[in-house]
Image: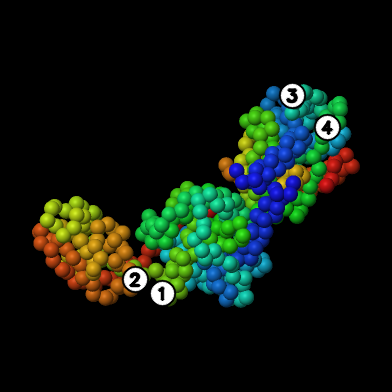
Amino acid sequence: MGMLSDLSQALAGAVEAAGGGVVRVDGRRRIPASGIVWSADGMVITAHHVVESDEEIRVGLPDGEMVPAELVGRDHTTDLALLRTEARDLSVPRWMETDELKVGHLVLALGRPGSSVLATMGIVSALDGAWRTPAGGMLDQYLQTDVVMYPGFSGGPLVDVEGRMIGLNTSGLLRGVSLTIGVKSLREVAEMLLTHGRVRRGYLGVGAQPVRLPAGAPSEVGLLLVSVESESPAEKGGLILGDVITGIEDDPVQTLDDLMAGLSGDRIGQPIRLTVLRGGVVTQISLIPGERPEWRPRWKRGSRN
Amino acid sequence: MEAWLEKLNGELAEVIRLARRSLVHIRTSRRGAGSATIVGGDGLLVTNAHVVNRREAEVTLGDGQTRPAHILAYDEAADLAAFKVEGEPLPAIGLGDSGSLQPGELVVALGDPWGIAGAATAGIVIGVGAEWPEMPPSGREWVIANLHLRPGNSGGPLINSRGDLVGINTMMTGPDVGVAIPAHVIHAFLQRSELEELAVMV
């Protein structure tokens, strides 16, 4: 049975090729989870939701050795965490650098909740452009598969049939769906975690909702402020209830995503100009965004993946 | 369809057709019923202890013919039982090398899920061994596979891409995860039951 055995060997070969870049992550009370070797000098990327505590984290290397790990940073909005270990000369995985992935391609999910690498198989179910996670993080692509997230697989890689890593799997972003965070977003978030220990996001301190504007307004849709926190950057800058934001610097604002995109980390502490419709009159308001307060974990609902 | 994909489909169907000849249905009482796997030309079959009682059984072959079978060995702790089917020799499946089974390898499980005779489900090996952080430690070895076992699959064969027996399907730990007793554990069971020489080794 030549071809069937060839396929079987190829799949097992892909698991073996990528398995050296998959580590075990002990960071929660229940079963351990998985992580991916991020650099040869001991950095490991994993899912934020599997690292319950900031301390006493341990990483199981592919050779079976357990080493202590320090939390470099975490970002709950993208469900990513970066760990640093003293391990050296780790085998860095080969990443898929092209966008050749298509719906229907065979893929493998790898994990190492114990000492050996485990695998499940599926296909790419959905592939789309950038999207915002329910927790407010921005990912460069939406990648959903039907791979079974075996217990402890969160934080492990999605791998193609050649053993190249496509991204990091997590069941913590959307309930009941196997999602993969692509390598481009992994690099962006890891870079920020390395620099700041967190993903910094600008903060105004307002609650807002999109509203259709009357004819004659500068745009069809804007963001109506329904709350302004006291002592917030918004209040200090002079924003009041009922204002409608239609622009941030030179970019139009029609959705909450537009506003979030305009409040990137590099704008913290820098004066920005908002275009606001107040009482039917377009005005410009200058204010200084703060930094969005850090999110504190509540570990009431654990995911077993 | 691409020619090679057609060939792959053909090979998969052929592996299943051959292995299915060694799959039988076994029944020992009104409630105890499941699948069983012929592993010796003399009518030696292996099944799970939990699907049979320690008594005479009746097996139903693929062609609908029924035959009596009598018990040879029963090991509740290992969840394995061996029977001998009376009458003409039956095609036996060879015991493969489960010790070298790797995660990612293709496997197919055969059995009678919900009473559907000879149904197949395919997937890959998730892992092999005794270390399963999500299961209570028991020291027992398992082949865990990414496929769909259902009640009635117990006792049926788990085969690799060459059609060799790598496990006996035993339970599921989720809708998409099947658990099988590895072939080398079955081999050890046959050995200590002094039935080893009756089985076919590959």
Q: Secondary structure at mark 1?
A: helix
The residue shown at (30%, 73%) is A268
Q: Secondary structure at mark 4?
A: loop
Q: Identify whether B184 is placed above or below A37.
A: above
Distance from disc 1 to disc 2, alpha carbons, whole Å, reads: 10 Å
Q: Which mark is residue B90?
A: 4
Distance from disc 3 to disc 4, alpha carbons, whole Å, reads: 14 Å
Q: Secondary structure at mark 2?
A: helix
The residue pinned by badge 1 equals: A196
* Circles 4 and 2 on the same chain: no
Quarter placement of the N terminus of chain B? top right
- Badge 1: chain ID: A
Q: Image quadrant of residue A264?
A: bottom left
The residue pinned by badge 3 equals: B64
Residue A147 is situated, as x and y percent measured from the top left of the image, at 55, 50
Distance from disc 4 to disc 2, alpha carbons, whole Å, reads: 72 Å
